C-alpha cells in the first residue's frame, strides 16, 4: 500500500525542492528578525502608562515622540535600501539590527520630552531599510507564485510580536525596582539587546542570493536561479522601470498613498491597543492586559496562515484586500461604541483585517517593480507609507482633544483603513494582471489544477 502510494506521488522537481528548502531555511529567521524589529518599534505602547507616570512626559509629547520615529525612518529609507541592493542583504540587514538594537536599549534613559523624541528619531534612522530590504530580499529568493505565501508568513511576525512580545513586555514592566530600574527601563534594555544579538547572528546565517547558497544542492540552486532570472526578464519585456522613473511613476505613488493609509490604521492600533484594552477592562497595563491584548493578534496569526495565499491563488487579490481593510476600519470605528466584551471582539476583527491585508498589498508593488527600481520603489512606498505612523498618533490626539470624545480617535484610525480599501479597488487592472496572470500560470507547475482558478 505505502509503496503504491509512494510510486503514484509525482517526484518533486529541483525548483520545488529549492523553494521548500529556502522557505525552511530563511523564513523562520526572517520572522524572528521582524518580531524583534516590530517589538522595538511598538513596545512604547506597553511602556506608555508607566513611562509617562515615571518621567512626566505629556500625552502630546508622547504622541509626537512615538510618531517622529517615522520621519527619520522615511528620510533614510531609500538610501538604506539602495545600499542593501549594492552590498547584499546579509551585511546590511545585520548592520541595521545591531544598530537599532543598541539604540532601542538606550530608550531606557529617555527621561525627558526631548530625549524621548530624539532617541525615537534616531531609532527610525537606524531601522530604515529593514522592512523594504526584506521585501526585496524575498524577490531575490522566491518566484512570484510563491511570494504571496512568503509575504503572508513574514507578516506573521506582527501578530507573533504581540502574542509573545506583549506578555514579555508586560512581565518586564512588572519587575519594577529590579536592579534599581523601572520596569519600562528593563523592557527597553532587554528587548533592545536581544535585537542586537540576533543581528550579529544574522551576519553569519543569512545568504544574499541563491547563487551563494552552499547549503543548497547545485541542481536546486541552478533551478531556482534560472527561474528567478526568467522572471526578471519577463519584467524587462513588460517595461521594467528604471529607478528614476519608478520614483515618479503614478502607480508607485498610488501604492505609497495606499500604504500610508494602511499604516495610519496599523500604527494607531499598535500604539494604543494595550491602553485601549486596559481602559475596556478597567485595569493598569501589565501582564494581564498584555495577555488579553495578545488575543486579537492570535486571531490575526491564524487568518494569515491561509488568507493571503488564497488571495493570490484565486486571482482576486483586490477583492480579498478590500474585504480585509473594510473589516479593519469598521471594526475599529465600532469599538468606540461597544461594551468591554464586544469591544475586544471588534478589536479582533480590526486587527485580523489589518494584518491579513498587508501581505496581499505588497504583492502588487513587488510584482510591478524589478531590479534597482524595486530597491528604490519599494523603499519609497514603505517610506512614504510609514509616515502614517507619524500622522496617526498626532491626529488621534488632536481629534480627541478638538471633539472632546475618545471615539474621535477610533474614527481617525478606522478611516485610514476604509480609504485604503478604496485605493486598493482603484489599482489599475494592468498592474493587477502584471502579477496575477503570471502567478496563476506559474502556479500550475506547483499546485493542483483544482487550486488554480482563471483570473477574471
Image (cartoon, rainbow, N blue to C red):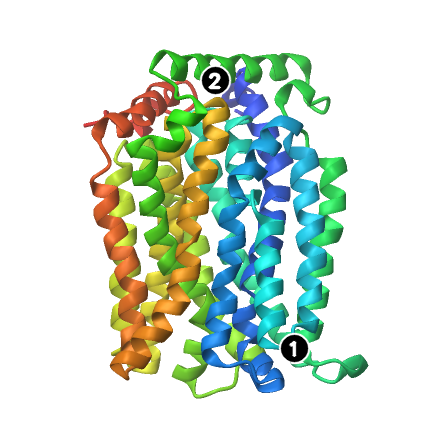
Rendered image: mark on residue 8: 2
Name the residue: 59% across, 82% down: 50
Write the residue at 31% across / 78% down: 400
Residue 406 at least partly seen: no
- Label 2 neighbour load within 10 Å: few <14, some 14-19, many 20+: few
Q: Is the residue 210 above or below the residue 308 in the image?
A: above
The nearer-to-camera label among 2 and 1 is: 1
Say what secondary structure mark 1 lies in. Answer: loop
Q: Give whichever of discs 2 and 1 has the lower sequence position.
A: 2
Q: Where's the C terminus, which quadrant?
A: top left
> Closer to the camera, 271 or 292?
271
Give how far across and how far down residue 398 sits, in percent.
Answer: 34, 74
Q: Secondary structure at mark 2?
A: helix
The percent coordinates of residue 404 (x first, y second) are: 28, 84
Decide which of 129, 417 is in the foreground and name it: 129
- Residue 111 shows which numbered tag? 1
Residue 214 in view: yes
Residue 311, label in figure: none
- In the image, residue 192 sits, relative to residue 404, either above or below, namely above
Which residue is farthest right?
179
Residue at 52% from the left image edge and 85% from the top image edge: 284
Q: How far separated are the C-alphas under marks 2 and 1?
A: 67 Å
Residue 8 rendering spot, x and y as whole percentages: 47, 17
Residue 110 quadrant: bottom right
At 28% from the left and 65% from the top, the residue drawn is 331
Q: Choose between 205 and 298: the one closer to the eye.
A: 205
Which quarter of the picture shows residue 363? top left
Residue farthest along the front direction in this orientation? 114
Amino acid at each position: 500500500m505505502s509503496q503504491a502510494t509512494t510510486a503514484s506521488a509525482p517526484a518533486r522537481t529541483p525548483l520545488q525542492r529549492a523553494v521548500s528548502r529556502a522557505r525552511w531555511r530563511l523564513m523562520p529567521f526572517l520572522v524572528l528578525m521582524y518580531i524583534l524589529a516590530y517589538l522595538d518599534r511598538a513596545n512604547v505602547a506597553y511602556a506608555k502608562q508607566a513611562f509617562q507616570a515615571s518621567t512626566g512626559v505629556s500625552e502630546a509629547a508622547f504622541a509626537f515622540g512615538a510618531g517622529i520615529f517615522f520621519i527619520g525612518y522615511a528620510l533614510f529609507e531609500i538610501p538604506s535600501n539602495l545600499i542593501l541592493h549594492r552590498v547584499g542583504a546579509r551585511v546590511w540587514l545585520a548592520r541595521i539590527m545591531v544598530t537599532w538594537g543598541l539604540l532601542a536599549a538606550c530608550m531606557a534613559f529617555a527621561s525627558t520630552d526631548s530625549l524621548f523624541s530624539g532617541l525615537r528619531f534616531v531609532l527610525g534612522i537606524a531601522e530604515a531599510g529593514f522592512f523594504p530590504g526584506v521585501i526585496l530580499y524575498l524577490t531575490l529568493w522566491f518566484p512570484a507564485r510563491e511570494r504571496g505565501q512568503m509575504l503572508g508568513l513574514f507578516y506573521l511576525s506582527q501578530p507573533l510580536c504581540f502574542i509573545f512580545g506583549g506578555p514579555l513586555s508586560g512581565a518586564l514592566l512588572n519587575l519594577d525596582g529590579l536592579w534599581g530600574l523601572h520596569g519600562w527601563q528593563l523592557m527597553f534594555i532587554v528587548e533592545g539587546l536581544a535585537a542586537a544579538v540576533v543581528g550579529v547572528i544574522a551576519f553569519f546565517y543569512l545568504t544574499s542570493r541563491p547563487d551563494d547558497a552552499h547549503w543548497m544542492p547545485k541542481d536546486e540552486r541552478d533551478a531556482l536561479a534560472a527561474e528567478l532570472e526568467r522572471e526578471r526578464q519577463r519584467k524587462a519585456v513588460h517595461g521594467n522601470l528604471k529607478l528614476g522613473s519608478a520614483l515618479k511613476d503614478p502607480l508607485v505613488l498610488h501604492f505609497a498613498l495606499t500604504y500610508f493609509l494602511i499604516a495610519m490604521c496599523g500604527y494607531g492600533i499598535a500604539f494604543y491597543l494595550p491602553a485601549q484594552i486596559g481602559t475596556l477592562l478597567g485595569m493598569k497595563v501589565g501582564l494581564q492586559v498584555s495577555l488579553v491584548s495578545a488575543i486579537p493578534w492570535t486571531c490575526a496569526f491564524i487568518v494569515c496562515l491561509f488568507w493571503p495565499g488564497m488571495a493570490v491563488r484565486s486571482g482576486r487579490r483586490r477583492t480579498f484586500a478590500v474585504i480585509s481593510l473594510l473589516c479593519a476600519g469598521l471594526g475599529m470605528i465600532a469599538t468606540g461604541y461597544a461594551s468591554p466584551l464586544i469591544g475586544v471582539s471588534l478589536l479582533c476583527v480590526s486587527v485580523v483585517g489589518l494584518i491579513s491585508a498587508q501581505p496581499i498589498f505588497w504583492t502588487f508593488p513587488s510584482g510591478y517593480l524589478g531590479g534597482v527600481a524595486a530597491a528604490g520603489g519599494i523603499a519609497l512606498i514603505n517610506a512614504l507609507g510609514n509616515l502614517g505612523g507619524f500622522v496617526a498618533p498626532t491626529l488621534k490626539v488632536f481629534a480627541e482633544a478638538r471633539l472632546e470624545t475618545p471615539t474621535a480617535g477610533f474614527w481617525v484610525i478606522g478611516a485610514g483603513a476604509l480609504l485604503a480599501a478604496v485605493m486598493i479597488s482603484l489599482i489599475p487592472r494592468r498592474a493587477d494582471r502584471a502579477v496575477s496572470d503570471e502567478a496563476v500560470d506559474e502556479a500550475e507547475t506547483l499546485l493542483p489544477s483544482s487550486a488554480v482558478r482563471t483570473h477574471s
